[in-house]
Amino acid sequence: VVPSLLTWPGSAIVHEIKGENWQLTAGFRARHGCVLLFDPTNAKSAAYNPLLEVRRGEWEVRDVQNIADILVDPEGSLEKRNHWEKTSHALLVGAILHVLYAETDKTLAGVAAFLSDPKRPIETTLDAMMKTAHLGKAGPHPVIASAARELLNKSDNERSGVLSTAMSFLGLYRDPVIAEVTGRCDWRIADIVGGKTPSTLYLVVPPSDINRTKPLIRLLLNQIGRRLTEDLPAKGDRHRLLLMLDEFPALGRLDFFESALAFMAGYGLKAFLIAQSLNQIEKAYGPNNSILDNCHVRVSFATNDERTAKRVSDALGTATEMKAMKNYAGHRLSPWLGHLMVSRSETARPLLTPGEVMQLPPTDEIVMVAGTPPIRAKKARYYEDARLRDRLLPPPTPSRGLAAQHDDWTALPVPAPQESKAGSTADEGRDDDPTGSEHRYQP
């Protein structure tokens, strides 16, 4: 990992747990470009607001739906959504769009505050979504209005269940530190690959907060992967990007990422995935995943897992060796044996048995490249290479970010809710009986 980061000339996104790669490689990479440290548990790190990556116009609904897809599957373990997850997804799409158009706090924390405003009931909130002129003279946004009306048409109990499900997905962003690091955009996705010099983004999460912050890291990686694989002609105008994902199965299942491995190389993206064993990958992506199938190069070290060792042994194939067999014939009391028969035959043997894979020396590794015989090589230790040791520089002071590009929402004026027709409030609840003959009066 460290030698790769010290020699990779393009941009990089590094996901790690302990922050060791930041300490060892950020100093050298800062000499050749901008380095950013994103730590969702540190308010002083570079900030990123996922909502400001939504592009206003024809792409806005698609971008918001992609955000909601990750929000309703925070663990990456859903194969099929139930009723509550489907309906809360629709509510989140409408609420996020409304917050972007009509609220001053255009963040996920702002979405949580909007849906759980203690000063008004949810019916009033939904009514505001339906009556706000998001599109100016064109009136309310149709997607926002339909999402609000869909929820208002439900019974009180079902409406409460949908709202509580949606709020459970936004609970992470009530943390003041999380709200701080997602409250502004110090960098944009386009800045990482489109700057004058390569940029490196370090995603560092302490081990104690891996599970809690997983939804935010999943959302960030999903947005980056989708955005950078949209436009093929733009590939030549940007730096190549290395996705260095340590312990990537801990992020849960990223469906888009699994399928994108097959074509992301055409967009200038290269993935470097690190896992402790195949069991981790199967736990996150299932036994029939295509992660290894789409990896052009696979590197294996000594493992303690028997299934992983057998899988590596099978992938290495077999070798042919000569086997000699000697037969002696004659009387057992004879001073010499009368006949000696020697036969030699070719037999197949695993190139490395599972036991030999598990017994590899700490200095050795197995490199398997598609279309090439396997290679048994020595590990490149950065502390044993004089050239790499010279590149181990102290890390820089964490930067607040790049010169962030203009977004489509920050300067957008907040529209006022449409005024109700005159007398509509006073006449609310009355029927069409002018004489009042059918009106019921309480005693």
Image (cartoon, rainbow, N blue to C red):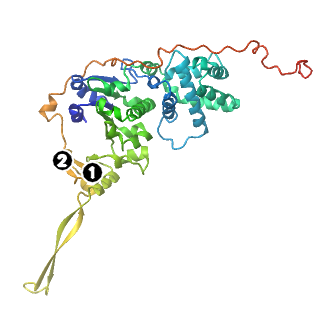
Foreground mark, 1 or 2, reads: 1
How far across and down, in percent of the image, does residue 5 sit? 24, 32
Q: How many marks?
A: 2
Looking at the image, tell me whether mark 1 or mark 2 is earlier in sequence order.
1
State the mark number for residue 80. Answer: none
Seen in the picture, residue 410 relative to 165 is either above or below; the reply is: above
* Residue appearing at x 46%, y 25% in the figure: 55
Seen in the picture, residue 319 relative to 73 is either above or below; the reply is: below
In the figure, is residue 241 to the left or right of 411? left
Q: Secondary structure at mark 2?
A: strand
How far across and down, in percent of the image, does residue 116 sit? 59, 21
> Crowding near pointer 1: few (<14 within 10 Å), some, many (20+)?
few
Q: Quadrant of the C terminus?
A: top right
Say which residue label 2 marks. 377
Q: Residue furthest right?
A: 437
Q: Amino acid at mark 2?
A: Ala
Labels 1 & 2 near each other (Cβ < 8 A): no
- Label 1 – label 2 distance at C-alpha: 16 Å
Q: Quadrant of residue 422?
A: top right
Q: Quadrant of residue 17?
A: top left
Q: Quadrant of residue 397?
A: top left
How far across and down, in percent of the image, does residue 26 sit? 25, 25
Q: Amino acid at mark 1?
A: Ala
Report the front residue among 368 and 355. Answer: 368
Say which residue label 1 marks. 370
Q: Is residue 128 visible?
A: yes
* Residue appearing at x 67%, y 33% in the figure: 158
Q: Secondary structure at mark 1?
A: loop
Report the front residue among 128 and 399. Answer: 128
Q: Is residue 253 visible?
A: no
